Amino acid sequence: MLDFTKKFSVRSAFGEALCEAARENKDIVVLDADLACSTQTKLFAKEFPDRFFDVGIAEQDMIATAAGLASEGKIPFAASFAVFATGRTYDQIRNSVCYPKFNVKIVGTHGGVTVGEDGASHEALEDIGLMRGLPNMTVIVPADCTECREAVKFAADYKGPVYIRVPRGNLPNIFDENYKFDSKANVLKQGKDLTVFTNGETLCEVIRSGEILKDKGIDIEIVNVPVVKPLDKETVLMSAKKTGLVVTVENHSVINGLGSAICETLSENLPLKVLRIGVNDVFGQSGKSSELLDFYGLTAEKIAEKIENFKGNNND
């Protein structure tokens, strides 16, 4: 049984993982856009000051500089808030990173509505969609500290562009020290009534919703999908075929995120009914992260209610 009362900073895990990777590989460098305290790249800056570059509030320059460093054999990790790291820099990512397939790692922290009080201007609800639409880009959404550390290790070793989305808030530990990141989706809980595909912050909410639904006689299969692109189609199709009904849950717009990726795969291979739970084509707003999760229907209780209704409306 997971302990949902104890939560840990995924951003700190990201900063620590950068330092661990850099101790083993001298080619790793880090760039930030005047947000080192928020992104936790300050940990890297303290240990490796000669390999850290704060470009100031100039995110486009950060990506262009990262591309230049990659062209000379360095492995740059460029970090900022997700809304700035992907939206403000889209042209540079497209033409200077993905088109030449440079070995640049982009890390967007503070994704989704859980940015909270900073409001709509800072809540990236389309970053995964922007990145998954780019050729050559790998998109990763870790769900806890362990998965984040493993994702950083994977990105450091992988040759090519990578986008990693890191949440602002703290999360419970879902995976232990034996967890190995292999870019595949993984079935965390077997079930027979329907499959729920999720990742990132909403994974813990889905796990809790599974406990609520169990008491109502609904047995859900839970599949963690940390890599949105390239999608592990084999696992997706295997689980969907088994249960016959699919739900996707994400702290992102329902347009062009995980839900869209799942629907695209199913429509071409195994057409099924799909319920997408996420932010329904609107901007976020200011508020406490817990209040916003509830408002947008992303708490365990709201997820369970939506799944129960969906299951009830699609009984054989």
Image (cartoon, rainbow, N blue to C red):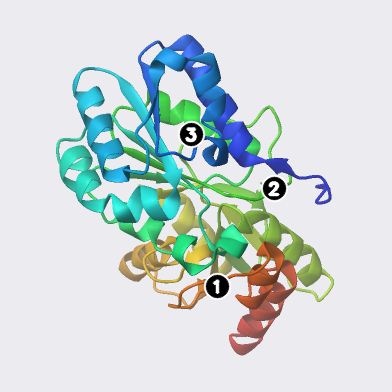
Task: Report which quarter residue 60 is drawn in.
Answer: top left
Residue shown at the point (55%, 44%) measured from the top left: 142
**Residue on which disc 1 sits:** 285
Residue, x 45% and y 58% (percent of image)?
237
The residue drawn where x is 65% and y is 49% is 188
Residue bearing the label numbered 3 = 182
**What residue do we see at 38% from left, 52% from top?**
84
48 to 233, vertically: above or below: above
**In front: mark 2 or mark 3?**
2
Q: Which residue is mark 2?
A: 171
Task: Using a 10 Å C-alpha cutoff, classify the residue at mark 2 as few (fewer than 14 neighbours), some (14 to 19) or many (20 or more).
Answer: many
Measure the alpha-carbon separation of dots 2 and 3. Answer: 21 Å
Q: Amino acid at mark 2?
A: Leu
- SS class, disc 1: loop
Give the residue type at disc 1: Gln
State the mark number for residue 244: none
Looking at the picture, how far across and down is residue 68, in whole percent?
Answer: 20, 27
In the rendered image, the residue lying farthest to the front is 56
